[in-house]
């Protein structure tokens, strides 16, 4: 689906978006694990609630979304880690990008590329 790129809104998720975090993660998992059952989904949902509350509070988790016409159409998450400093990471901070996902009907519009650029730690000043 071709979209009007001027109507795309990118935003960082916050504590009030916990239910949205969970929905997006479950949609991502359902798309990549077609055999996920309802019992597994409920266990994952409970675990995600605890995870997001803890890591949002610790500021070591960032979520970004892209909205189009008021609907979330894409997301990406970044987990931050701190390890002992070394020559490659002088401050010891590293990140893992995960859950990069755009709903199928909105793919091939460069949205995931833009989310990855916007989730950049330096831009978000974590």
Image: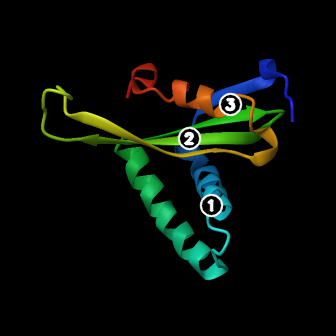
**Which quadrant of the rendered structure holds the C terminus?**
top left
The percent position of residue 2, horizontal first and vertical second, equals 86, 30
* Secondary structure of residue under mark 1: helix
The percent position of residue 45, horizontal first and vertical second, equals 56, 67
Residue at point 12%, 31% (across, down):
86
Q: Is residue 42 left or right of residue 51?
A: right
Q: Is residue 119 left or right of residue 68?
A: left
In the displayed structure, 39 sits above or below 13; it is below
Which numbered marker is on residue 32? 1
Residue under label 3: 111
Residue under label 2: 76
Which quarter of the figure has residue 31? Answer: bottom right
Closer to the chain start, of discs 3 and 1, is: 1
Residue at point 39%, 46% (across, down):
57
Query: For mark 2, does the 10 Å Cα neighbourhood hold few (<14), some (14 to 19), or many (20 or more) residues?
Result: many
Residue at point 13%, 39% (across, down):
84
Determine the CA span between mark 3 and mark 2: 10 Å
In the displayed structure, 102 sits above or below 53; it is above
Which residue is most to the front?
Answer: 108
């Amino acid at each position: 689906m071709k979209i009007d790129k001027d109507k795309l809104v990118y935003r960082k998720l916050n504590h009030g978006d916990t239910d949205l975090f969970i929905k997006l993660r479950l949609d991502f998992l359902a798309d990549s694990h077609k055999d996920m059952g309802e019992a597994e989904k409920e266990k994952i949902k409970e675990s995600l609630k605890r995870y997001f509350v803890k890591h949002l509070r610790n500021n070591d988790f960032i979520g970004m979304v892209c909205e189009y016409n008021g609907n979330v159409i894409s997301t990406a998450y970044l987990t931050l880690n701190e390890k002992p400093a070394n020559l490659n990471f002088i401050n010891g901070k590293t990140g893992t990008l995960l859950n990069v996902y755009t709903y199928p009907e909105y793919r091939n519009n460069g949205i995931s590329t833009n989310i990855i650029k916007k989730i950049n730690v330096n831009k978000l000043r974590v």
